[in-house]
Structure formats: C-alpha cells, structure tokens
Amino acid sequence: MILYGLPTCSDCKAALRALADQGVTFRDIRAEPLSAAEWAPLIAEFGDNLIDRKSQAYRNLNAWMRESETDAQLADQPALMARPVITDGTRWSLGWDAAAQAVWLD
C-alpha cells in the first residue's frame, strides 16, 4: 500500500497513523516527485479532482498554468495534488474522509 502526500499535511499524518499496522509506504511527492508514468494512473482515476484548487500553491499559479492540463500542473508543482492519495494497486482513494477510511480500515 502506498500513500502519496506531503509530510506536513495533517490528513496525510492522520492516514499514516491509522494505516501504520497495514504496512503503508509513504511517498513524499515534493521530495521525490512522480514521473509522468507514475502520475498517469492517478490522473486516470481522479481526473482534475486530483488538483487541490483551495490550496495556496494553486492560488499562486499564474493564469496560464491554471488553464493548463492536470498533468502539466502536477509536473510543475507536485504540491498541487489533493492529499492523501492511497492505493494498494487495485483500489484508490483521495483524501482522508469517512469514505476513504471505510475503504482502508474495514
């Protein structure tokens, strides 16, 4: 199981604590950016919902980058990703809300 996120993200920290006994691997998307091939399944699964439009990073984008495709935005600014993204290779979740917790904690 892989959790994609940032070490400073409170939702990522909560998910890591809750999933600690399940052998989750943490991938810091800022320190170890994903390649285009690694972004592809995430974008296929979540589309433009993968971009956190409420974030400071998004508000700091120039107009041209805001109008760019999701893959270009994430390649340029990985911290734009809504977090956390969790996968076991077959199932995916975005965020750490009740729906995500139901997937991973049952």
Image (spheres, rainbow, N blue to C red):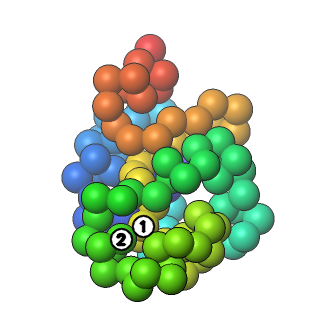
Residue beneath the point at 42% across and 67% down: 80
The amino acid on which the numbered mark 1 sits, given as a three-letter code, is Leu
Q: Position of residue 43 (x, y in %)?
A: 64, 53
Q: Which mark is residue 80?
A: 1
Check the image and report above or below for 93 versus 11.
above
- SS class, disc 1: helix
In the image: residue 21, left or right of residue 14: right
Residue 68 seen from this side: yes
Check the image and report above or below for 55 versus 91.
below
Residue beneath the point at 46% across and 58% down: 51
* Quarter where residue 46 is shown: top right
In the image: residue 58, left or right of residue 89: left
* Nearest to the observer: residue 58 or residue 95: 58
Reading the chain from its start, which is encountered first: label 2 or label 1?
Answer: 2
Residue 23 seen from this side: no
Q: Position of residue 45 (x, y in %)?
A: 65, 42
- SS class, disc 2: helix
State the quadrant of the N terminus: top right
* Nearest to the observer: residue 106 or residue 77: 77
Q: Which mark is residue 58?
A: 2
The amino acid on which the numbered mark 2 sits, given as a three-letter code, is Tyr
State the quadrant of the C terminus: top left
Residue closest to the far right: 37
Residue beneath the point at 51% across and 42% down: 86
Q: Position of residue 30 (x, y in %)?
A: 45, 75
Instruction: Classify 10 Å Cα crowding around label 2: few (below 14), some (14-19), many (20 and above).
Output: some
In the image: residue 54, left or right of residue 79: left
Q: Which mark is residue 20?
A: none
Q: Are marks 2 and 1 in contact (CB under 8 Å)?
A: yes
Residue beneath the point at 76% across and 65% down: 37
